[in-house]
Image: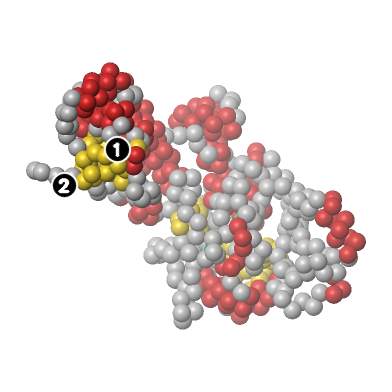
Amino acid sequence: MTQQTTRIPISSIILDEDIYPRKGIDHRRVGIFAENIRDGFKFEPVEVELVPDKSGRYRLLDGAHRWSAYKSTGVSETEAIIKNLDGNDPLLYAAKKAIGPIQLTEDEARNTARRAYTRNSSLSSADIGKAIGRARRTVDSYIADLKAATRMGMDIKIFRMNHLGIPQDRIAKRLGVNQASIHNHLLKMATLPNLINADLERGFTVAQVAEKHNWTEPMVWSLALKDKEDLERFKELGWGLRTWDQWEWNDCDKRFGDDWPGRIPAQLIAHILFYFSKQNDLILDPMAGGGVTPDTCLALSRRCWAFDMTDRPETRPEIEPYTWTLSSDQQLSWPVTSKEKADLIIFDPPYFDKKAADYDRKSISALPKKEYLEFFEAFFALLRLNAKKTTRLAFINADWRDFQSKPAAEESGKGAILIDDYLRILNKTGWKHTHIIQAPMSAQRFSAVVVSAMQKKRILGVISRYVIILKQ
Ligand SMILES: C[S@@+](CC[C@H](N)C(=O)[O-])C[C@H]1O[C@@H](n2cnc3c(N)ncnc32)[C@H](O)[C@@H]1O
């Protein structure tokens, strides 16, 4: 088959090391090619593809030595075949071309196989072998450790999602694997914790074991605390239990949840779980952010379905991506078809526009006040539709006062959204409150300079935050 060739400038071609299968250019070979060029010898065209995101630039797929010889002899243009690889791996294509004249060395073959597998773990050893001129079993030996690490990554993700009670069809969809293979992974789950448990029994700390096995701390806690009562779990986690309806902490427990704008302390979630749910209950967090709810659920042995508009499949597979959006007729839809309904819903939405700059532009924090409150009305109604008679709702929010640089006595209250605005909407949509718990935010994040400026101007800041517990 003849292929279309085009003349392109040598200066528009680059050698991209990411897709070059050899250790380096063989300068002796380049020297021979240069001599051939001076003698008037015509070479086969080089093969290139367009460099992604750089128009008019090409990267070599085949012909690195010819290209080097052209450069060294001052040739300005060459015949080239411009390939479109249609998603095939350019490194493996380049390797296949390279082994035409000279086989890859052992080092080059191993290195290319490992790089190709790291870029795309769905490549089979047979496919890699064909490209680099090695048997499938040889490739297996090159990439055995990488395969094990990928498999372990998948096992850990499935273990975590399964532990949180996410149904198998949703785990399969989320991880992009078929349900039968989830089933096979789950069969191994019984033995997966053995190594972790063995190290815990030997007296290693949860943090040490998590580090050693590349598990997250909350997952190791879920094993370390297995079969324990809630109170014992609080003790082992170092969380003093609050007996009264004022819950205050100076800091978030860094072991649970990610560093996230608007992160709440795991201790706060743990108290909601302690008082308003029991082990194995299903908890729903519709705007889960940094994942503090699923992490705390692992430690306290609750199941948890979590959603957020921000998708982080690698680090937070258990937070399923979903954006709650009001349709033109002010309707919202439910993200899953599963019939099971939550025992407890923990809802910690953006506090109006407080962190608008940190969240996605489709976040409800970007809505004007009227639309923001309309969203809540539709959302609380939707929660009620998808709740059972006994479902509790824990709604976390704070007063939002429009007091930028204003002394307290001059605040008009016009732009404000206060906690009783939410209560009104909650009651209107059929939710009745049973408890209003004070859970103030820490004031430690304010610098002495800011505090002193506020005091001079008689500005009254907000650190009050409430957990409102409701039922139908
Ligand atoms: C206050 S944060 C939750 C923080 C979380 N409790 C934590 O401690 O990490 C609010 C979350 O709501 C999410 N969010 C805002 N609007 C959303 C929408 N329309 N649909 C889904 N998630 C949304 C944001 O991405 C953000 O992560």
Instruction: Tell me what residue is drawn at x 58 percent, y 26 percent.
Output: 204
Query: Is disc 2 surrounded by few (<14), some (14 to 19) or many (20+) residues within 10 Å?
Result: few
Say what secondary structure mark 2 lies in.
loop
> Residue furthest toward the right?
456
Residue position marked by numbered label 1 in the rendering: 76
Assign the N terminus to one quadrant of the image. top left
How far is disc 1 from disc 2 in space, using C-alphas? 20 Å
Pick the front one: 273 or 346: 346
> Residue furthest toward the left?
1
> Residue furthest toward the top?
28
Assign the C terminus to one quadrant of the image. bottom right
Give x and y (percent) for residue 377. 57, 76
**Measured along the vertical axis of the image, is residue 383 above or below residue 317?**
below
- Classify mark 2 as within 8 Å of ligand 1 or not, answering yes or no: no
Pick the front one: 411 or 386: 411
Q: Nearer the viewer, mark 1 or mark 2?
A: 1
**Measured along the vertical axis of the image, is residue 210 above or below residue 303?**
above
* 445 displayed left or right of 185: right
Instruction: Tell me what residue is drawn at x 78 percent, y 53 percent.
Output: 446
Q: Earlier in the sequence, mark 1 or mark 2?
A: 2
Within the image, what quadrant is residue 68 found in?
top left
Residue position marked by numbered label 2 in the rendering: 4
* 48 displayed left or right of 168: left
Instruction: Tell me what residue is drawn at x 49 percent, y 45 percent.
Output: 315
Query: Is disc 1 surrounded by few (<14), some (14 to 19) or many (20+) residues within 10 Å?
Result: few
**Measured along the vertical axis of the image, is residue 76 above or below residue 244?**
above
Q: Is residue 399 visible?
A: yes
Amino acid on which the number 2 mark rests in the picture = Gln
* 101 displayed left or right of 278: left
Give x and y (percent) for residue 170. 38, 55
Amino acid on which the number 1 mark rests in the picture = Ser
